[in-house]
Amino acid sequence: MIYRAQVAVADVDRGYYADHALTLARHPSETEERMMVRLLAFALHADPDLVFGRGLSSEDEADLSRSDDTGQLQLWIEVGLPEEKWVRKAAARTRRMVLILYGGSRANQWWRQNAASLERFEHLSVLQCDEEGTRALARLADRNMTLSCTIQEGDVLVSDGRQSATVKVTVLKAV
């Protein structure tokens, strides 16, 4: 299923302000919550060169990525709770990697089990989104969305003009 989103990003923390026309493909096995966390990941790292991967059907590809002019991967963003060996493989292919965890207690458990082994990856950042926020974000999902996204001090306010969701983003591991 294809979703289209007009997203106005106001990232106060980075001083980044821009509008983006995005197309997201949602795999039949992907939840609206995961798709919207991918959209949130875009907003958190918004850049004209940041692109969505092909999704869940493409295991060897990032959820979002940015390459330089030579095609070298500069940023690999992954949403969810991947296996540590998969993180190791992906991290070897890019200059910087970001994992964005969501899912409440499942994400907390995943982090407890993997934190020590992920410490060795110097160019890996790990962020966690609060469960209440990502569930509220999922309620904003629509086939054609117009969203404003304001990022400030670890909070992301996403609004469609009728309703809004606030997602708290906690840095678990910084680069």
Image: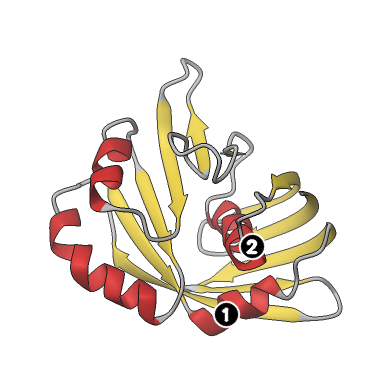
Q: Is residue 118 above or below residue 50?
A: below
**Residue 14 horizontal/vertical position (percent):** 51, 56
Q: Quadrant of residue 80?
A: bottom left
In the image, farthest residue toward the top:
70
Q: Residue at x 61, y 78 (%)?
A: 135
**Residue 105 horizontal/vertical position (percent):** 37, 81
Mark sitting earlier along the chain (2/1): 2
Q: Is residue 84 above or below residue 156?
A: above
In the image, farthest residue toward the bottom:
132
Q: Residue at x 75, y 56 (%)?
A: 7
Q: Quadrant of residue 11?
A: bottom right
Q: Which mark is residue 133?
A: 1
Q: Which residue is mark 2?
A: 36
Q: Which amino acid does the dot numbered 2 rest on? A: Met
Residue nearest the observer in this picture, 19 or 146: 146
Q: Secondary structure at mark 1?
A: helix
Bin the neighbour count of mark 2 within 10 Å (Cα to Cα): few under 14, some 14-19, many 20 and up. Answer: many
Q: Is residue 173 above or below residue 124?
A: below
Q: Quadrant of residue 41?
A: bottom right
**Residue 40 horizontal/vertical position (percent):** 59, 61
**Circle 2/circle 1 CB separation < 8 Å:** no
Disc 2 to disc 1, C-alpha distance: 11 Å
Q: Secondary structure at mark 2?
A: helix
Bin the neighbour count of mark 1 within 10 Å (Cα to Cα): few under 14, some 14-19, many 20 and up. Answer: many
Q: As drawn, is 23 to the left or to the right of 10?
A: right
Residue nearest the observer in this picture, 10 or 174: 174
Q: Which amino acid does the dot numbered 1 rest on? A: Gly
Residue nearest the observer in this picture, 71 or 143: 143
